[in-house]
């Protein structure tokens, strides 16, 4: 694959492509195991297979960013987004760890090395955070099928072990904002491809493939992190819409929304 938004080095990772899986060997499943969640995931498993069959954009692990024309428009405004990020980072120590908001990720991260600053996520939006980043919000709202948008912050030395996302009806977009050098020490592996973020460049991948990420430098790495609806043909597009809207009412997502509301009140009250 050509260099698409970040630098790819598939040759440096010798495992063969395994395709999408519905679990990650050696890792506990993300999320809770309540009856509601188990029932929903049984439905999700069937819909995921339809999503593979009815995809409008194929099912690669990593996409050429030209597949999504809007990505180039986001790239052109990266310095505007970076400017608002720098304001947020003046209070980096007050930002929540990812698992403080989304407790389901505690199986892959339990330290302060992965922080987030959320604008919107699966039915909830942070109006106070948006007020701090109005231009970023203006820009991300142009992304078709936007489901989540946030800054994703990797502290020096952070490593996320192999895992997969809970559902393949969305794709993930990363825009490099702060990428420390040497570039070779800051990367994400998606299936059998190793990708290196670049400042001002987009990386679009399917997090339903096994992936892991690391920052082996002594500086912070930050990307704009977006989930957007995967383009699908009928009938998968209808079922996908139903799944994504149902997800907002699951206990895990509702807990995340409440965790974020509590953090948001505390953070902005101290401003």
Image (cartoon, rainbow, N blue to C red):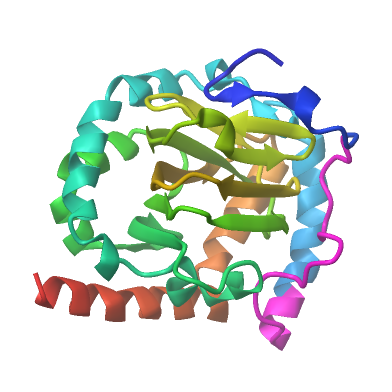
Which of 87/264 is in front? Answer: 87
* Residue 143 visible in the shown view: no
Verify whether residue 32 appears in magenta. Answer: yes
x 68%, y 70%: residue: 30
Q: Is residue 18 above or below residue 98?
A: above
Q: Is residue 160 above or below residue 177?
A: below
x 24%, y 45%: residue: 85
Question: What is the x, y in percent for residue 123?
Answer: 41, 62
Q: Is residue 113 left or right of residue 195?
A: left
For the stretch drawn in magenta, the main secondary structure is loop
Picture quarter containing residue 20?
top right
Instruction: Give the farthest residue toward the top.
Output: 2
* Residue 181 visible in the shown view: yes
Image quadrant where one finds the N terminus? top right
Looking at the rendering, the stretch of residues picked out in magenta corresponds to 17-39
Instruction: Give the farthest residue toward the bottom.
Output: 34
Number of dots carrying numbers = 0
Q: Is residue 189 above or below residue 266?
A: above
Verify whether residue 150 appears in magenta. Answer: no
Picture quarter containing residue 160?
bottom right
x 72%, y 57%: residue: 163
Which of 271/64 is in front? Answer: 271
Q: Is residue 223 left or right of residue 227?
A: left
């Amino acid at each position: 694959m050509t260099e698409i938004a970040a630098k790819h080095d598939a040759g440096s990772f010798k495992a063969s492509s395994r395709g999408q899986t519905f679990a990650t060997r050696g890792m506990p499943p993300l999320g809770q195991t309540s009856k509601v969640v188990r029932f929903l995931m049984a439905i999700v498993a069937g819909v995921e297979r339809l999503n593979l069959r009815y995809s409008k954009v194929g099912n690669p692990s990593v996409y050429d960013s030209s597949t999504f024309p809007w990505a180039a428009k986001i790239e052109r405004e990266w310095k505007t987004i970076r400017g608002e990020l720098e304001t947020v980072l003046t209070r980096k120590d007050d930002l929540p760890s990812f698992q403080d908001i989304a407790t389901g990720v505690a199986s892959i991260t339990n330290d302060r090395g992965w922080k987030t600053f959320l604008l919107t996520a699966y039915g909830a939006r942070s109006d106070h955070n948006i007020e701090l980043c109005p231009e970023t919000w203006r820009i991300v709202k142009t992304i078709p099928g936007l489901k989540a948008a946030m800054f994703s912050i990797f502290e020096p030395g952070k490593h996320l072990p192999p895992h997969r996302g809970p559902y393949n009806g969305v794709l993930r977009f990363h825009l490099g904002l702060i990428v420390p050098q040497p570039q070779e020490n800051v990367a994400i592996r998606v299936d059998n491809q190793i990708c290196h973020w670049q400042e001002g460049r987009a990386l679009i991948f399917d997090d339903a493939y096994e992936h892991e990420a690391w920052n082996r430098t002594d500086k912070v790495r930050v990307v704009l992190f977006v989930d957007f609806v995967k383009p699908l043909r009928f009938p998968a597009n209808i079922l996908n819409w139903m799944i994504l809207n149902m997800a907002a009412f699951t206990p895990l997502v509702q807990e995340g929304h409440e965790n974020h509301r509590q953090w948001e009140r505390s953070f902005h009250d101290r401003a």
